[in-house]
Image: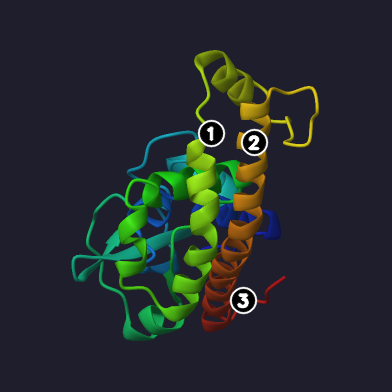
Amino acid sequence: MMSWPELDQQLAFVAWATKALPWAELFAFDAPGALVVVLAEDAGAGREGDLAGAEHRRRCGALDLVRRHEGAWQRLDGRVVELAPEVAERMRCDVAPTFDGAADAAAAICLRFGPRAGRMMQLRLTEPQRAQLGRLQPLVDQCASHVLDDAQRRLVQEHPELRGDSPELEAPVRGYLQSQEQLGAEYLPLHRRETAKLWTAIHRLGALLGYRLH
């Protein structure tokens, strides 16, 4: 009985979901997490921030996520839910953590893999993931090697438009930005593939419910 979301709401939902906490911070490359796209009357409930509750429903319609956690399907606020088998099967996405910007990707990969670079290849990775992260590791090391002082760090934070090929920048800042840009260029194709899984799940949900999709 709920309205099918408009195209701009679907776009807003996908943009939000790529930054959702369980996907971006809890799911690991060595243990991808499972998400299911659903329609819920209280979509966005139980969450904080500028896209929760009524604001989520205004911008994203009734689209929401359910995740697999500790053997049960849960809403993002922790409530356990029962999913019909056909819903769990058809709308399920097995996803790795993903980010929609080069800076976010660089920071996240450095945070996740930088301190344990020596152990990275020992993780339980699929061969494509192992190859991808093997290519990323030198960039992780390079990005982590550029130590910026407080002034340089503020410069980078306050001016996201800065590019690594700007000749007027100091060498540490230039090197940091260049390695960050390379890292993001390597990582963003992963983001696009993971985002496509969400779109597929939305389309399957619409087909199951008999909606005509955009």
- The disc, 2 or 1, on the residue closer to the chain's N-terminal end is 1
**The C terminus: image quadrant:** bottom right
Q: Earlier in the sequence, mark 1 or mark 3?
A: 1
Residue tagged 1: 146
Relative side of 116 to 170, left or right: left
Q: Cα distance, mark 3 to mark 2?
A: 50 Å
Residue holding disc 2: 175
Asked if 182 appears above or below 88 in the picture, the reply is above
Q: Secondary structure at mark 3?
A: loop
Is mark 2 in CB contact (under 8 Å) with mark 1? yes
Residue 44, position in %: x, y?
Answer: 42, 48
Q: Which residue sits at x=55%, y=71%?
A: 202
Q: Residues within 10 Å of mark 1 (few under 14, many from 20)?
A: some
The 10 Å Cα crowd at callout 2, few under 14, some 14 to 19, many 20 or more, is many
Query: Gap in Å between the C-alphas at discs 1 and 3?
Result: 51 Å
**Residue 5: % across, % down:** 61, 60
Q: Secondary structure at mark 2?
A: helix
Point out which mark residue 211 bears.
3
Is residue 136 positioned above or below 196 on the image? above
Query: Mark 2 is on which residue type?
Result: Gly
Q: Residue at x 21, y 69 (%)?
A: 72
Farthest residue, direction left: 70
Which amino acid, mark 1? His
What is the count of numbered marks?
A: 3
Q: Amino acid at mark 3?
A: Tyr
Mark 1 vs mark 3: in front? 1
Alpha carbons under labels 2 and 1: distance apart? 7 Å
Residue at the extreme right:
167
Q: Marks 3 and 2: which is nearer the front?
A: 2
Q: Position of residue 63 (x, y in %)?
A: 50, 60
**CB atoms at circles 1 and 3 under 8 Å apart?**
no
